[in-house]
Image (spheres, rainbow, N blue to C red):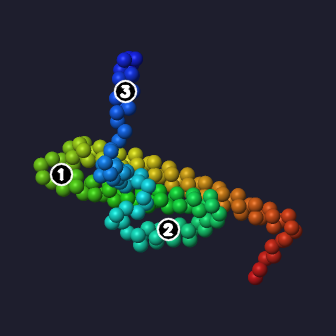
Amino acid sequence: MTTQKQFEANRSNAQHSSGPKSEQGRAIVSQNALKHGVFSKQILLEGASKKEFEALKAEFHEQFHPRGFLEHRFCERALAAAWRLSRVTQMESMLMNHAAKKSFDRTGITEVLGGYQGDELSLLSRYEISLEKILFRSLAELRALQSTRKSDLAMAISEIGFVPQKTG
């Protein structure tokens, strides 16, 4: 438990820390979220294929046909999560390849994965779980909105007495 004296000292010390002062320091700190790029605000990182991202985006829009602001937002959120999930998969492969190369030298794969790479794999696994939750929630919300929209349309059509005819 923190004593009152420690609490006051911590509060006093916190007043002296306000982040980087120089433009260079601020520029460096602004890139902290890009350490691995999983949760960065930028979906496309340097070196990522814009063509592949645009193809995935086209597939999402082709499959879900979002209408209106919210449907577009949930579709875009799902798209971002799917793209970031692929990034996690790539990082996991790179980490495993690195561990496999080390294991052929003098240590076993278990030792390698039990160390630093094991911690990194564990972290990537947590990111993967979080991104999957975002993806599935976004898709569920999108589908719920679309279902409501379609039922509202069907109700409006039935209210005006329109009865669809079988064709063919």
Where on the picture, by quarter, is residue 64?
Answer: bottom right
> Foreground mark, 2 or 3?
3
Q: Is residue 68 left or right of residue 52?
A: right
Instruction: Name the element at disc 3.
Output: helix
Q: Which residue is mark 2?
A: 57
Name which of mark 2 and mark 3 comes first in the sequence: 3
Between residues 10 and 129, which one lies in front from this camera angle?
10
Instruction: Name the element at disc 2.
Output: helix
Image: 2 above or below 37: above
Q: Which residue is mark 1?
A: 103
For the residue marked with disc 3, what is the amino acid?
Ser
Quick one: label 1, few (<14), some, or many (20+) residues within 10 Å?
some
Between residues 83 and 18, which one lies in front from this camera angle?
18
Return the x and y of residue 104 as percentages of the image width and height.
15, 54
For the residue marked with disc 1, what is the amino acid?
Ser
> Foreground mark, 1 or 2?
2
Q: Are marks 2 and 3 in contact (CB under 8 Å)?
A: no
Q: Are marks 1 and 3 in contact (CB under 8 Å)?
A: no
